[in-house]
Image: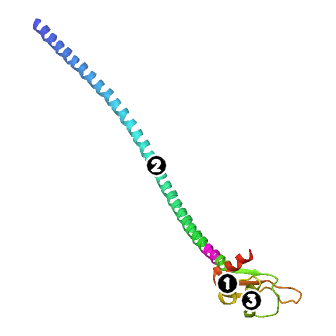
Amino acid sequence: MDIVMTAILQRLESMDTRLAKLDSIESTVNNITQRTDKIEHKVNNLETKLCDIANSRAFESDQIEYIQQKQTEIELKLKEIKTAQEQSIKESDIEYRRIEQQRQELSKNLIFYKIPDIDDDDNECKIEILKFIENEMKIPDATKTIKIESATRWGKFKEEKTRPVQVIFEIFPDREKVRNKLI
C-alpha cells in the first residue's frame, strides 16, 4: 500500500506540476490575448486614421482640382484683360497720334478776321492775305518769303458781313512769325 500511495502521491504531484504548468500556460495565453486585444485596438485605430487620411486626401484632391480649375479660369480672365489692355493701349496710341497730327496741322493755322471780303477763290484769298501781312502787319517781303498752303473763307458770301479766313501755312515758323507780329 505504501507503494500505491507513493504512486498516487507521485501522480498527484505530477498533476500539480501539470496544473501549475497549465496555470502558467493560461496566464501566458491571457497575456497574449490581452496583447492581441491591444494590437487589434491599435490596428482598428490605425484603420480609422487611414480612412480619415484617405478621406482627407480625397477632399484635398477635390480641392486641388477646384483650385486648378479656378486658376485656369483666372488665367483666362487675365489673358482676356491683358489682351483688352493691349488693345486699349493700341487704341489710345492711335488716338494720341491722330490728335497729335491734328494738333500739328492746326498749329500751322491762323484765323484772320475783318479782312475785306469779296466773293473770290482760294488763290485770290492767299494773295489778299499775303498782301495784308506785308502791308498792314509790316512783315517785309511776306509775299515772297511766307508760304501759304491754303486760305479759305468760312461760310457763304454776304455783302453785309465779313467772313473769317482760315490760313494754313506751309511751315510752322512762318505761322509763328505772323502770330508774333500780332502779339
- Kind of residue at badge 2: Glu
Q: Which mark is nearer the camera, 3 or 2? A: 3
Would you identify the image quadrant in which residue 130 lies?
Answer: bottom right
Q: Answer few, some or many: residues within 10 Å of disc 1's Cα (few below 14, many 20 plus, some between 14 and 19).
A: many
Circle number at residue 131: 3
- Kind of residue at badge 3: Lys
Q: Residue at x 87, y 85 (%)?
A: 161
State yes or no: residue 46 in magenta: no
Q: Nearer the viewer, residue 130 or 86?
A: 130
Residue lying furthest top: 2
Task: For the N terminus, give its image quadrant.
Answer: top left
113 left or right of 71?
right
Give the alpha-carbon distance from disc 3 to disc 2, as whole Å. Answer: 88 Å
Q: Which residues are magenta?
A: 94-101
State yes or no: residue 95 in magenta: yes
- Percent across and percent down for residue 120 are 79, 94
Residue lying furthest right: 160
Q: Residue at x 60, y 72 (%)?
A: 91
Q: Earlier in the sequence, mark 2 or mark 1?
A: 2
Placement of 103 over or under 80, stated as above or below: below
Give the alpha-carbon distance from disc 2 to disc 1, as whole Å. Answer: 74 Å
Task: For the C terminus, give its image quadrant.
Answer: bottom right
Residue that badge 2 annotates:
60
Residue that badge 1 annotates:
169
SS of the residue under disc 3 = helix
